[in-house]
Image: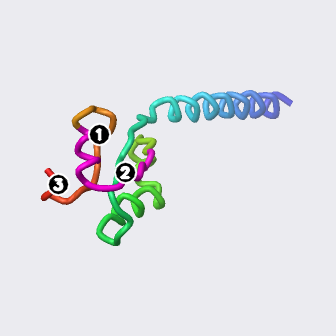
Amino acid sequence: MFQVRTLKVIHFAVLIWLAVFHRSAEAQMTKIKVAYPTTVGSMAVVWVTKESKLFEKHGLEVELIYIAGSSRVVQAMLAKDIPISEIRWSAI
């Protein structure tokens, strides 16, 4: 009887710990916007990374935003609306 009660208490404590740990992991996600100027294959790096959930693995909640044209992406970065983008070097 004592062992069953002890196991129930331990089981309950583990469930509570997992619930708290899971919520704290979600709270640590950093939200960030990433812009891309075109839908060609060379820009697939951000899509593959997002679809394979590598951003989430490293604590980033990434929102991919399409902005037509590299010069407009640079303008958005200069305005500090977009902190990261994938553009061609000639646009800078």
- State the image quarter where residue 20 is shown: top right
Quarter of the image that includes the N terminus = top right
Distance between mark 2 and mark 3 Cα atoms: 13 Å
Indicate yes or no whether the magenta region holds residue 66. Answer: yes
Classify 10 Å Cα crowding around label 3: few (below 14), some (14-19), many (20 and above).
few
Q: Amino acid at mark 2?
A: Ile
Which callout, 3 or 1, points at the residue further toward the start of the chain? 1
SS at mark 1 in the image = helix
Chain part drawn in magenta = 63-77
Q: Residue 9, image x and y in percent? A: 74, 27
User: Mark 3 near mark 1, Cβ–Cβ under 8 Å?
Assistant: no
Q: Residue at x 32, y 64 (%)?
A: 43
Q: Residue at x 45, y 35 (%)?
A: 29
Which callout, 1 or 2, points at the residue further toward the start of the chain? 2
Q: Residue at x 33, y 34 (%)?
A: 81
Q: Residue 73, image x and y in percent? A: 28, 47
User: Mark 1 near mark 2, Cβ–Cβ under 8 Å?
Assistant: yes
Indicate yes or no whether the magenta region holds residue 6. Answer: no
Closer to us: 12 or 58? 58
SS at mark 3 in the image = helix
Where is 88 relative to 81, above or below?
below
Q: Residue 23, image x and y in percent? A: 58, 31
Q: Amino acid at mark 3?
A: Ala
Task: Name the residue carrying label 1.
Answer: 76
Closer to us: 84 or 26? 84
Q: Residue 75, image x and y in percent? A: 24, 41
Distance between mark 1 and mark 2 Cα atoms: 9 Å
Q: Is residue 34 left or right of residue 21?
A: left
Q: Amino acid at mark 1?
A: Ala
Task: Name the residue carrying label 3.
Answer: 91
Q: Is residue 1 left or right of residue 73?
A: right
